[in-house]
Amino acid sequence: MDSGMLWFDNDPKIDLVSKISRAAIYYCKKYGHEPNICYVHPSMIEEEKKVIGTIRLQASTAIIPYHFWLEEVSKEKIKPER
């Protein structure tokens, strides 16, 4: 996590995909390009959902629940799936 945008969304009526999609739209408007990775607390990731559109989800205990860290990183920095 070098530089990016922290997004908070604890609305219980909105699913994870919608939360990250809204954050990505805002990120794109603010920075002029799309994020390709989103760090989230491990408790928020559903095991079958690792990618949302072009955004890869990455679990990180450094992120507090209901917070999302979005950024654009080079493909070399993205950890491969296990």
Image (tube, rainbow, N blue to C red):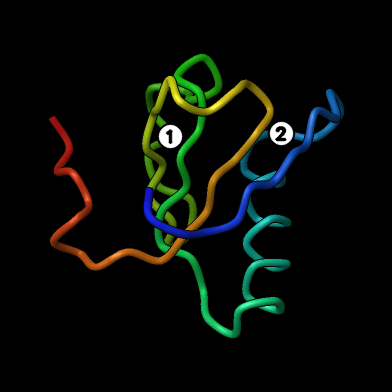
* In the displayed structure image, the side of residue 51 where residue 20 appears, left or right: right
* Residue at image location 51% in from the left, 14% down from the top: 43
Q: Which secondary structure lies at badge 1?
A: loop
Q: CA distance from mark 2 to mark 1?
A: 12 Å
Percent of width and height locating residue 68: 59, 40
Mark on residue 30?
none
Residue on which disc 2 sits: 15
Quadrant of the rendered structure where residue 17 is? top right
Residue picked out by circle 1: 49
Residue 82, image quadrant: top left
Question: What x and y, as percent, mark residue 70?
Answer: 52, 53
Q: Quadrant of residue 25?
A: bottom right
Q: Position of residue 38 (x, y in %)?
A: 47, 47
Q: In terms of sequence position, does the residue under pointer 2 or pointer 1 come before the other?
A: 2
Which residue is at 14% across, 43% downward?
80
- Label 2 is placed on what type of residue? Asp
On screen, residue 20 versus residue 1, left or right, reads right
Query: Residue at the spot x=61%, y=78% of the render?
Result: 31
Callout 2 environment at 10 Å: few (<14), some (14 to 19), or many (20+)? few
Q: Nearer the viewer, residue 62 or 27?
A: 62
68 is higher (above) or lower (below) than 22: above
Q: Residue furthest bottom?
A: 32
**Residue 69 place in picture, x, y as percent:** 54, 45
Q: Secondary structure at mark 2?
A: loop
